[in-house]
Amino acid sequence: MAANPWALFGNALEKILDGTVDLDTDSLRMVLVGSGWTPNQATNALWSDISANEIANGNGYATHGKALTQTLSRSGLVVTLDCDDQTWSGSTFVVAYAVIVRDADGNGALAAGDIPLFYAELEDGGTLSPSAGDLSITINASGVYSFTAGTVA
C-alpha cells in the first residue's frame, strides 16, 4: 500500500539544517506506530515522545522497525530523499502510522533521544489490521520528501 504524504517534524528540519542529521549517511529506521499516538509536528522532537505508541514486538513486527536504505538526489533546485519500500511478512497487528527515525548510533535499537524525522498516516483517519499477511509500505515514486531551494522575500 502507498503511504499518505510524509510530514516533516519541526525539530527534524532544525537538526537537518544545523548538521546534526545527515540524510545521506545517517542510519534511518521505519517504525510502525498505533492509533494511540497523535502526531504533532511542532512538539514531537524525540523518539521518547512517540515510543510508547510503537506497536508491540511479535506477530510479524520487531521492536524499532526496519533499517532503511536511503538516497539523496538533486534536480535543479529540488533535493529529494528517497528510501526503499518496506514489508512486514506474516503480520497480525493494528497500525496507524509509519515514522522514519534517525538511529544516531546505528545499532538498530532506538534510544530516547533519537530524532523522528518524518511520519505518514497509513490509512486516512483509521488503522490497518493485516491478519497473518504482508503489510507493505510503498514509498511514492517521487520519494519521501523534497526540499526546494528558493529566495526569501
Image (tube, rainbow, N blue to C red):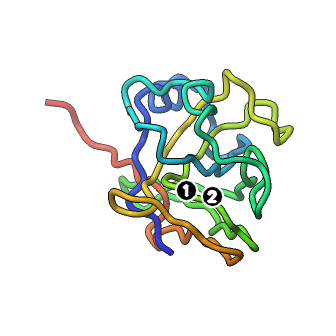
Side (left or right) of 120 relative to 136? left
What whole-number distance in Å separates the C-alpha atoms at marks 2 and 1?
26 Å
Label 2, secondary structure: give it. strand
x 62%, y 58%: residue: 71
Q: Residue at x 40, y 29 (%)?
A: 10
The image position of residue 3, as x and y in percent, is 46, 65
Q: Say which residue appears at 41% left-offset and 37% top-offset.
A: 38
How many numbered marks have been drawn onto this rendered protein structure? 2
In the foreground, 68 or 126: 126
Q: What residue type is labelled 2?
A: Thr
> What numbered label is drawn on residue 103?
none
Residue 16 lies left or right of residue 10; in this view the side is right
Quarter in which the C terminus is drawn: top left
Classify 53 as above or below 79. above
Q: Residue furthest bottom?
A: 133
Quadrant of the rendered image containing residue 89: bottom right
Q: Which of 98/33 is in front?
A: 33
Residue tagged by mark 2? 71
- Image coordinates for residue 114, horizontal then vertical, percent: 67, 28
Mark 1 — residue? 95
Q: Can you give x and y, in whole percent of width and height, for residue 109 in the image?
A: 81, 37
Residue at horizontal 63 percent and vertical 33 percent from the top: 51
Nearest the eye: 21 or 37: 37
Label 1 is placed on what type of residue? Val
Question: What percent of the width, then of the height, locates residue 65?
Answer: 72, 51
- Looking at the image, the residue that sits furthest to the left is 153
Q: Residues within 10 Å of mark 2 (few under 14, many from 20)?
A: some
The mark closer to the camera, 2 or 1, is 1
Q: Which one is earlier in the sequence, the residue at label 2 or at label 1? A: 2
